[in-house]
Structure formats: structure tokens, C-alpha cells
Image: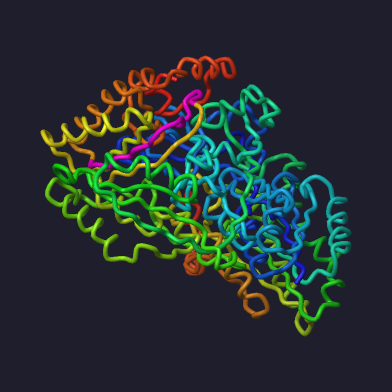
Amino acid sequence: MNILIVGASAGLGRCLSEEAARHGHHLLLVSSDGRDLAAIAGDLHLRYGVRAEYFICEFGADPEHESAVSEAAKRFGPIDALLYPIGFAQQEDSGLQDNRAALSLVRVNFLAQVSLTAALWSVLLERRRAFIVGFGSIASVRGRSRNVVYGAAKRALSSYFESLRHLSTGTNIHVHFYQLGYLNTHQNFGKRLPLPKASPESLARIVLKQLGRARGPVFYPWYWRPISLGLHFVPWFIYKRLQF
Amino acid sequence: MLRQAEPTPPTEARRYRSFDGGVSVNSSCFAPDRYRFWDDATRSAGISRGAGFSYSAASFAQSVPSVEHCHFNRLLDFDSETNILEVETGVTLGQLYQFAAPRGLFVPVQPGHPKITVGGCIGADVHGKNQFRDGTFREITDSLQLFHPSHGVLDLSRSNNPGIFSLTCGGYGLTGNILSARLRLTPTVSSRVSLEVAPVANIYEFAADLERAAAANELVYSWHDFTARGKGFGRGVIVTGTFDQRRPAAKREERWEGSSRLDSATVGRWPICLFNRLTTPVFNRLYRTSFEWLPSIKQISLYDFLFPVHNKEIYFRLFGKGGFHECQILLGPTQFNSFVEKIQRRLERHPVAITLTSAKLFRGRKELLRFTGDGICIALNFPRNRQGAAFASFLDELLIQHGGLPNLIKDSRLSARVVKAAYSEYDRFRSRLRDFDPRRLYRSELSERLQL
């Protein structure tokens, strides 16, 4: 398969790249820093013998970049799978930031996936089987006073992927969506968190193994599903007092 | 997955312990996973840390954050004509093996555990199975990239910044963070190695055999029993290894022990030390007898040959939470017998549970603080307790008397006084380090203890 991985330079994206290369898939890696991408692409080619190319793209900056990625994907060859382990959070995301900062969050966490999927949808339809995998966050389960725009963008993404699943019914395209809890990545490095950090390597193995198996949203680790469900039922007069 | 906009990269608290258990400190670390970490020169002057297998505390200090290179563990480029492999310095020797073995190649100079990183090998300028023939890790390091906040990223080699290259290979990480290196791999003729074991009656009669064997074999070392008394003191074996040319190089790697759980944090988990003056002679006798039971020539895989420690990890755990001493000392050929004789006399008066004594032949030019030179390298292991500390101090004085060199990376308690006395280029190393880095940004427990 030819796989396009957006946000491939670190954390879950890097683990997915490695796992995909281990399975012998050819990769087009997209991220914002060419130094990281060159290192990963070189490594995967040397160790697994796969074709690994990369494209540098700053998604938060300019919508033109997304069309450049879709062009690069078309040049790479027919894409069979789109993986979106991309995300961007700001510490000062109170919801009161200026338009530019808020738009940047929305672009990276939501709009980039929308525009890339739209650009490559017809390519995917031509394949015998094709896959789109998105990654949400438990931060989007219920609104709170931290990660305000990030959480909203991820909730939009969750809704978008539900719609994509609906749209892809009866086609060759399989759509998967993972709601992620705490992962042991640089994002959570040095943080004391109330629940353990899950392994991104294990998640990458699951994602590649589950390709093509039609399922609803998957919570990872699993225990975030009951927690998420529980949060929905916390009455507002209690919820508004919670600090997390 | 998530790109976080942060003013400063996060740190995490760590309790670091030297592998021999001699030093434990609370410190902190960065664990960068992107190259942009090195863009901001002001924030990244932390001492580099690889796998933490150094017996000495070279990769941490109480007051200085460490920079863990675990995410910088990628193979970058390979030239199949010259067999030069470019890697990030968090790459482990096991990863190198996985890449090289199926291509009929190997790294001729490497220590015995697959989790040790390339950066650590360069920083300590380690030796391998046959230093006499292959030299130290510097010999196979073609060039490297070094980051230092005051200098940016420097390309170093024998022709480009040769002075800093020389200072960095065996510089214990004090010149900066080594980002990548180009290593020369060597073709193997086989994926199997024939080991031959020859008995040695005592420690005084093996030096000539060692020299003959070192010239003709990939692997040469001797093992001796220093708990034996009288004429049998130091009896043991000489082990030599050569590639078995009847078998071609493997097309695929034979195995990969990625499941090893040995590291500096877990090695001292057992509450008590099982080595003492009663058990150690029994242990040594059994070990020596095991050589007699086994055939004198046996075949092992290339993996077992390169990483002899991987299936003997329990040995380190048997020392318990107290840890152990390793004193590795390089002696001139004419000094060796006198040195050992004095050890024998000392042990007769004050027995110590010497769990391992091993010797290798060395060759090289003494320079800066690199552990190299002409002579015989002898390594002794013993438990870290009151008798052990007294014996280690005795060895310090003895090596000074005999003009020996202690291996700084193997002994976490060496003092500045002993190192100054032993290394004639101590002051030159120190002044060259200050010429390169007048602010002395890179510090570790080792550098503080040795007043570097």
C-alpha cells in the first residue's frame, strides 16, 4: 500500500510510520520540519527497504499548503490510506486568543484533514480498498475552560469522521476514528497526569492491524470510553466545579 | 502526534544511578524528539545521556539536566561501496547489528551489551573484543556532528576540526551533544564464530600466549580466578575467537534480544549481594570447571560473539542493591607481573570476593584521557562494600606506582588525584576543553569529581 501520514515526525505519527514500514508499505510523510522527516524517511528506507518520501508543510499557516500536499500525494503514486496523527495545542488556549491563533488551531486540528480528504477522495475511490484514519482527543468529550479551541476543533473532527463513515458506506473506503487519552509522547512529557500514559507504539500496531475492519470510534486506552460516558452524565452544577 | 507550542521544552524529574551502583542522584532531563530542540542554543546545554550503561556517572549530575537521546535513534544514510553508515547517536549497538548482519557486515569495536548507544561509545572511546588489533571506537568513527550552544552544529572529522574531533572521541560528553556519526562497518566472513578455550595455569604465564593470540583472532581475552590461593592464583583460561569460514555470512539477522530489561535503574533491585568470601570461590571454581566440561572448540552465533553480556545479565543482579566495583587498569607489559604479584599478596592478607578477573592485550598511543596505550588491560570486579572500597583504594595506589591507567568510564569512585597522577595529559585535556568551551557548559558527576 501507499500511505500518506500527516504529522509523521514525532510521537504517534512516527510510531505509525515505523509500523507501516514494518508491514512493507510505502510512505509519504508530511510534517513541518524537514530535518525530522529526512531522518525518519532515511531510517525507514534503510531498515525496511520501503519507499519513504517526505513533504514539508506548515498546516497552520496557509491553506495553499494543503493543496501542495495533495499534489505531492498524487505525484507519489496512488494513495491507499490517509493517516492523520496530526495535532497542535497551545498552552494559552483559553478561547479568548486572537483570530490568527484560533484559526491556526482550527486549521491544524480540523480543516487540514477536511481539505486533504476532499482533495484525495477521488483517488481513494479508484483503489480496490482504501482507508482514512483520524485521531481525536478526550479533550473534546466535554467543553471546559482549558484547550478551548483545540477541544472544539477536535469535536468538529469527531463529527466530520462520523459523517465520513456515513459517506463512505457502500464504497471501497474504510473510515476509522480513534479517541485518544494520554499517550506517552513528548506532549505529555514531564506532566503529572491522573491516569497512566498509554504506549503510542501499541496504538500504532492496533491501528495498522485494524485497517479495514469496520468499527465505530475506538477509545484508546479502552477505559476512556466509560470515563467519557460518565463525564456526559455529570450534572452541570457539579461539572462546572471540576478543575481538570 | 500533538505539536505543542511551548516557550521551553519540558523536563522530567529522574533518579539516576551509575551502572555500578556507586552514584545515585536526583536530577532532571530533557527528552527531545525533534531537531528544533537544538535550534535554541540557550536551553539545550545539558549533558547527553544514551542508555545509561556507563559504570561511571558520565551522563548526569545533580545540578545539570541530562539530554536523553532515546528519540534520536535513526539510521540516516548508508554507502554500500565504502560501508559507511551514518546514524543518530541514540542508535544502539543492537540496532546496528540488525542492520549490518544481514548485509554481511559488523562493527568490529563494541562493548558487550546491545542496548549501549553509539553516542556513549564515542564519548567514552570504548574498546571491543580485540583492542590490540582493532583499536578503540575512534578508529571506526569517520566523522560526527557536534552541537554546542556557543559554536552551533559542528562537522568534525580527522580533516575537519581535527582537534575538536580528537577531544570529543573520549571526551566523556563534555564538548557538547553528539548528534550523528558516520561509522565504518567491516565485512564479516561468516555468521558463526569459533571459540577456542585454552587453560592457563596461573596469571603469570599467559602474557606471551595473549600476544600471539591477539594478532590472529577476532576475539581474545583471558579469565582468571583471583580467589584461588598459592601457585594456582589466577588460574583460568584464554578464550580466542575467529570467524568460522565454513559458514557464509547470514542473510537475515539471527535474533534480536530487544526484551532485555537490564539497565542502570533495575540492575540493583535485589536486596542482598550473593557474592561474598565464601560463595565467590565456589562460583569461580564452577565457572572454571564449566570450561573443562564444554568442548575446547565451540561455535557461537555472531550475536553471542558481539554481545556476550546479553545472556549473562543475572551476573550484575547478583551484586544486589549495593552494586559492584569494576577496576579496569592498563599496565605496561613489564609492569604487569609485579602488579599482579602485589595484588596476590594483598589478597592473601585481606581476602576480597573477586568475582571476575579478565585481561586483554592493548596497543595504542596514550593521548588526553583516552583509555589506550601499549600493554595489558586487567579488569577486576568485586562487591561494593567496606572491604571492596579498601581494596579499590589499594589498587589506586598500586596503579600509580606501576604507571598504570585506570579506565574512567568503568569506575565511579576514581578521584581527581589518582587520575591526575595516572594520565600525563590530564592538564592538556582540561586546558583544551576550556579553550573550546570557556564557560564549561557541559558537566557531569564524572567531570565534577575529576575536576575537569
Residue at 16% x, 32% y: name it.
B346
Is A103 on the left-hand or right-hand side of B201?
right
Quarter placement of the C terminus of chain B: top left
Is B92 on the left-hand or right-hand side of B159?
left
Outermost bottom residue: A170
Q: Magenta stretch?
A: B366-383
Residue B390 in percent (x, y) is at 19, 30
Instruction: State whether residue A229 is above or below residue B60.
Output: below
Is A152 on the left-hand or right-hand side of B129?
right
Instruction: State whether residue B121 is above or below residue A11.
Output: above
Q: In this figure, what is the number of numbered marks?
A: 0
Residue at 17% x, 50% y: name it.
B281
Residue at 21% x, 32% y: name it.
B391
Residue B27 in percent (x, y) is at 41, 34
Residue at 65% x, 30% y: name it.
B40
Quarter placement of the N terminus of chain B: bottom right
The question of residue B209 being in magenta is answered with no
Whether residue B395 is visible here, answered yes or no, is yes
The question of residue B373 being in magenta is answered with yes
